[in-house]
Image (spheres, rainbow, N blue to C red):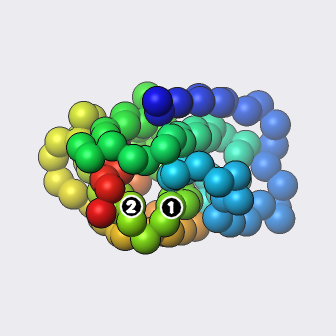
């Protein structure tokens, strides 16, 4: 079963914040940040799960980050792919996709439009 943990932190991000792949060992993990370089001072979200569904599971970004994504980290095996969508419910334009790990520490203006993503068993 997939879990979604939403966190909004009121602490100021440190200048040394850096993006890094997770070592927690879930099937997949997606961390989405409202600051570049994975800073947590604005808002951030964590999505994770086994990633073993044969269907592509869709996840919506919280409204606090909708169209405001500045960086993200996707950690997964090379058996998982991720597709990033402009609209909620994995609809609209595909803004990017990857198989396996993916870090973007400074998302493009177009990429900031992220509203949802799906994780597929590849």
Name the residue carrying label 1: 76
> Mark 2 falls on what kind of element?
strand
Q: Is residue 64 above or below residue 107?
A: above
Q: Where is residue 42 in the image (x, y as percent from the top left)?
A: 66, 40
| Residue 36 % position (x, y) | 61, 60
Which quadrant of the view contains residue 87? top left
Q: Front-most of 31 and 1?
A: 1
Q: Residue at x 55, y 60 (%)?
A: 75
Q: Mark 1 packing: few (<14 Cα in 10 Å), some, or many (20+)?
A: many
Point out residue 107 in the picture as x, y percentages from the top left corner: 47, 64
- Visible in this render: residue 19? no
Q: Pointer 2: residues within 10 angstroms few (<14), some, or many (20+)?
A: many
Viewer-side residue, 11 vs 4: 4
**The image quarter in which residue 57 lies:** top left
Mark 2 and mark 1 residues within 8 Å of each other at the beta carbon:
yes
The residue drawn where x is 76% and y is 31% is 10
Q: Mark 2 points at which residue?
A: 80
**Residues under labels 2 and 1: Cα distance?**
6 Å
Left or right, 53 with reference to 69: left
């Amino acid at each position: 079963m997939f879990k979604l943990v939403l966190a909004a932190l009121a602490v100021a991000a440190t200048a040394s914040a850096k993006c890094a792949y997770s070592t927690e060992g879930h099937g997949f993990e997606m961390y989405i940040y409202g600051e570049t370089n994975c800073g947590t001072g604005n808002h951030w979200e964590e999505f994770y799960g086994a990633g073993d569904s044969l269907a592509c599971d869709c996840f919506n970004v919280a409204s606090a980050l909708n169209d405001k994504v500045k960086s993200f980290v996707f950690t997964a095996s090379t058996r998982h792919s991720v597709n990033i969508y402009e609209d909620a419910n994995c609809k609209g334009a595909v803004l990017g996709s990857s198989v396996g790990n993916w870090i973007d520490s400074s998302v493009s203006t177009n990429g900031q439009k992220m509203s949802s993503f799906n994780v597929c068993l590849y």
